[in-house]
Amino acid sequence: MVKKKFEYGIYGVIIGLVVGALLAFGELNWLKKSQRETMLIPVVGFTVLITTVLGYVKGSDIGKTIYIEERLGIDKADHTYGKDGRYWVGTTTWTDQRDGSIWTLSTQRVNGHLCTAFQGQVFRNHGIPNANQDTVPRYHMAVVNEVFEKLRNGFVEGQKQELVL
């Protein structure tokens, strides 16, 4: 994880330097011509320093997120939608890279309502009777994003993760 954070942190520093330089020279246009000579170093230096630090922080956060997604396998999740009889079904499957376990999230009509099941256990009743081509992908992806966010937030390296929904 440290390597990914550092790598993306360096990318953030490079982007921060470029953005900082552009902002600093744009900022100099607001100064009088007589002040530009004396204010060049402080304005450019301060702006570039701040944007470089912010670029490193944001880049390392992105690197950490990418590392977690790779370890959990959610970066290679397979989303499929299709018809099962009269109604549409949405399924997302991914393999946890840490132990090889397969996780499944399915959205379909159950007992007249659209429901989402995680590993075969119904955990979300959406409360609508429609299971058509428009509603299933929308509700399914909302739940997928929620589950992935919980997985990302609860990630601890080296431990098997239990998802509490």
Image (tube, helix red, strand yellow):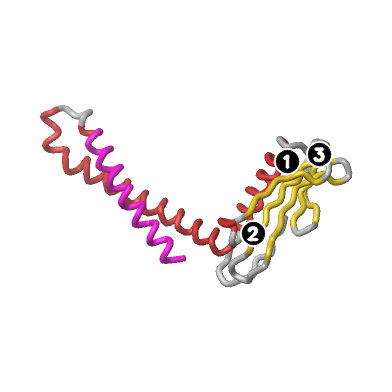
Disc 1: which residue: 136
Q: Decide: marks 3, 1 in contact (CB < 8 A)? A: no
* Residue 8 falls left or right of residue 164: left
The mark tally for this picture is: 3
Residue 127 versus residue 130: which sits nearer the camera?
130
Disc 2: which residue: 94
Instruction: Give the dominant element type of the magenta stretch: helix, strand or loop.
Output: helix
The stretch of residues the image draws in magenta is 1-26
Q: The disc labelled 3 sits on which kind of residue?
A: Gly
Q: Position of residue 90 (x, y in %)?
A: 72, 47
* Quadrant in which residue 27 is drawn: top left
Q: The disc labelled 1 sits on which kind of residue?
A: Val
- The mark found on residue 127 in the picture is 3
Q: Position of residue 47 (x, y in %)?
A: 27, 43
Instruction: For marks 2 and 1, give the CA distance.
Output: 19 Å
| Labels 3, 2: front one | 2
